[in-house]
Amino acid sequence: MNRYHLVHTTEFHYDGPVSESCNEVRLRPMSDGSQSCLSFQLTTTPPSHAESYEDAFGNQVHQFNVLKEHVHLKIETDSVVLRLPGPEISAQATLEQVDSAREELREEFYDYLVQSNYVPHLAALGDLISAAEYNSDGTAFGFSEAASRFIHEQFESIPGATHVRCSIEDTLRLRAGVCQDLAHLLLGVARRRGIPARYVSGYLVPLRTDHSDSELDEVIVGLACHAWVEVYIPGCGWKSLDPTLGKAVGSGHVRIGYGRDYGDVVPVRGVYKGRAGQRRSVDVQLHSNVDGEGRGQPDAVVAAAAEETTVVHICPRDCALCGNHCMWCQSFSRSA
């Protein structure tokens, strides 16, 4: 078992006063069969009162409003998570069995089989599907593993290669992307083959070893925020795969939320009143070797840091009524 202390800080600095800031965050780690969220605290500056609810995918969502004028907003979450060993792969459903259960799977896992905004059903995925079938053992999980491994080998993981609204069409064209893009690509391959698959957002805690892992180091540069995939195997349940690392998901993966794609689990989403532009910065501190009171060891800070970025509003839905701000945006924004 591994116990982690996570502090996630998002800050917005505005060019001028803004008001009526309405926000929602999905940053509370999940509690399920392989991890338990022992504590969670959300604080904001200026202070606010947060309310929570569970969305349709089972994620914990916190909402808060800052109504008075302000030029700076800080959102900080503090969590302690216990990561438990995951179950071993048991029943090995074949691809033929998945095909025969297609109608039943579609009825139960409709949202995880149909196309979504970031994961359209593209004919161009056919080559990836064929390659995964050829290199698999004929089982549904073996196919998914082969697809994840192929994506890892054939597509470069490059921080900044894409932007938040890219779809798998862009990833296929560039042959590169960030963890979000590679997860979307694996979702597309699995769903086109009839295997239910869901997007997972969370953190990747680099476990200390005697040997440096350069691929892991590259991922950690991307804030330690991470994304991977879970596929549903009949008779076995949900199983996790990480196409960015090309490895199975391990005890260093901490889950925050599930969804059809990134759009369902955006960490921070909100709108505000005012015409001021804004700069955003994100900092993630991950502490391992946490004691019973949630304190990390002095040398346990293993990740930090994002450079400040400016976000300009480009409404992905061309909302006629969005005015200066749009609730469908992936983050705080202003009109271009």
Image (tube, rainbow, N blue to C red):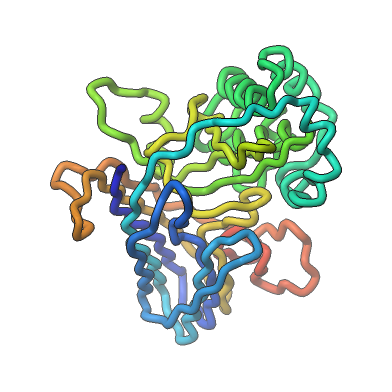
Q: Nearer the viewer, residue 233 or 62?
A: 233
Quarter holding residue 216: top left
Closer to the camera in the image, 2 or 152:
2
Q: Which quadrant of the structure image shows residue 192?
A: top right
Q: Residue at x 33, y 64 (%)?
A: 39
Image spot of residue 162 (x, y percent): 60, 38
Picture quadrant of residue 76? bottom left
- The residue sitting at 78% across, 35% down in the picture is 194
At which x and y percent is residue 287? 26, 48
Q: Residue at x 16, y 47 (%)?
A: 297
Q: Residue at x 37, y 80 (%)?
A: 47
Give the left or right position of residue 75, taking residue 154 as reference: left
Q: Residue 265 at x, y = what percent?
A: 58, 56
Q: Is residue 159 left or right of residue 138?
A: left
Q: Quadrant of the N terminus?
A: top left
Q: Residue furthest bottom?
A: 68
Which residue is most to the left?
298
- Quarter of the figure that contains the C terminus: bottom right
Query: How many labels sit on residues?
Result: 0
Residue 163 drawn at (x, y percent): 60, 44
- In this view, 152 is above or below 31: above
Q: Is residue 110 above or below residue 222?
A: below
Give the answer, above or below, for where 36 lies relative to 220: below
